[in-house]
Amino acid sequence: MTDKQNPRQLAYLALRDVHKGAYADVAIDRALHKATLLRADRNLVTELVYGSVRRLRSLDTLLDQLGKKKANQQNPDLRTILHLGLYQLRYLDNISAATAVNSTVELAKTNSFSALTGVVNGILRQYIRLKEEKGDPLKLPENPVERLGIFHSFPNWIIEAWLAQLGFAETEQLCAAMNQTPSIDLRVNILRASIEEVEAAMQSVGVTVNRINYLENPLPANEEGAEGGVSKQEDKISVPQALRLSGKIGAIQELPGFTEGWWTVQDSSAQLVSYLLDPQPGEVVIDACAAPGGKTTHIAELMGDRGKVWGCDRTPSRLKKLKENAQRLNLKSIQICTGDSRQLPQFTNKCDRALLDAPCSGLGTLNRRADARWRQTPETVRELSTLQAQLLDHAATWVKPGGILVYATCTVHSPENEDIIRAFLDTHSNWQIDPPLANSPLANFSTSEGWIKVLPHRHQMDGFFMVRLKQTVNSFDIPYT
């Protein structure tokens, strides 16, 4: 088997790139670009890379406990090979222990570590022996932060933030949710197809689809450790355009309806943002950080493609993706503006509604962004919070008196969410939170403060924060229509 046909070798090459600074998704795409693999083997490459990156802290701790050298003292490439072996043994039940050991030893030989194959074999077999004797070879400390951080593989600062917000039990649930393979949701383009048509098309090629029209595991708002949440177990949320795919899916671009613009990929929680904005036909709407265009195109769909939707972003290459998405979905109302949304005075008092889906740490989507937990730090979050506040201040100047501004992030970290909104309201007396009406499905997510929080372990969607803000006119409230 050549290197281009060996999924474990390709995973090793991708992981080596990640450890040198590459983003995991980019490294995987690069590794698979010229590969000639069956779909199952391509899936294995993806699982091994994303899984090994997610479980980095757990795997390093195992190496510290099993090897004579600590993980950070190992040759970096040998460490990567050992990660792959331990990941298969610990987390992939569909791969036998013998296959995991033998394939990892072969990786060591292939990549110039023939002299250390005995070390590789010994560490992996010691893991197997301890598992048979003790159940779990991973020794965990008593300290709850360290314990959760090592077992679920997160840095301590993220665990500390979640514990302060949610308490121990829910933090443990959230950690587990963030290590699950992410779902794939579609948003049906209601201007091109019905949800029934897309369902039938997917089923015709053997793809299982389910509507996102309920909460599978809501938690009551008054449960100890919960902040907000769903008020009644019988409350339900409908995401009208959403379908969740499952089973063997294959290449997204080859699914029926993609070329025709019947649907686009967008997580259900991200779809809720545009419903909260509630854009109306004929309005002028600005999406401040639009690329690659998921919410921009959704806004245009909800407006019936009537009116004007400005998609703003400072990165031309990302705006190119927005243009491509708009063309595929056959949307004509979208206009492109290249520039920093902190410096676009031409939009002052020009729009009826504005959306700021702010750049953030992505701590609500860590299952999708395997390496984000290691890239983000308290320092990067502070920098992002400064940027978020600046963007919000400027986006507010675009909205006509009486207009609406929605602030959203895909993080569950308070300094990027609640703290930003509190600070904005303290300095902008003509703005107030406009919570969803009691009969709105979105009200089921609303907290007592009026903002909306979606948490993966509660709602089986990506983590999101969103709040609808209303500008007053002459100190009188504008009714929410």
Image (cartoon, rainbow, N blue to C red):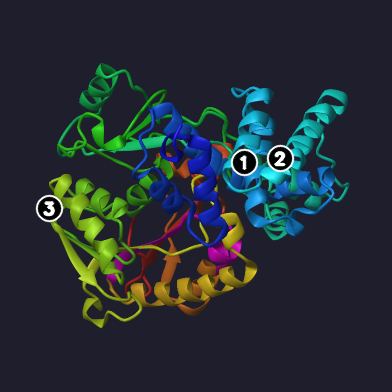
Q: Where residue 418 sits in the image (x, y, percent)?
A: 56, 63
Mark number for residue 306?
Answer: 3
Q: Report if residue 406 lies within the magenta region.
A: yes
Q: Where residue 152 sits in the image (x, y, percent)?
A: 69, 43
* Residue drawn where x is 54% and y is 45% of the image: 12
Q: What element carries label 2?
A: helix
Task: Name the N-terminal-most of marks 3 and 1.
Answer: 1
Q: Is residue 389 above or below residue 86?
A: below
* Residue drawn where x is 58% and y is 47% of the image: 111
| Alpha carbon distance from label 3 to label 1 | 62 Å
Mark number for residue 117?
Answer: 2
Q: Where residue 181 sits in the image (x, y, percent)?
A: 52, 36
Viewer-proximal residue among 204 and 239: 204
Task: Name the N-terminal-most of marks 2 and 3.
Answer: 2
Do the numbered discs 3 and 1 sit on residues whose CB atoms are within 8 Å?
no
- Amino acid type of the residue tagged 1 in the rendering: Lys
Q: What stretch is highlighted in magenta?
A: 400-419
| Crowd tier of the residue under label 2, counting other residues whose Cα lies within 10 Å: few below 14, some 14–19, many 20 or above | some
| Alpha carbon distance from label 2 to label 3 | 65 Å
Quarter-of-image position of residue 408 = bottom left
Viewer-proximal residue among 351 and 37: 37
Q: Is residue 449 visible?
A: no
Q: Is residue 288 visible?
A: yes
* Residue drawn where x is 50% and y is 44% of the image: 445
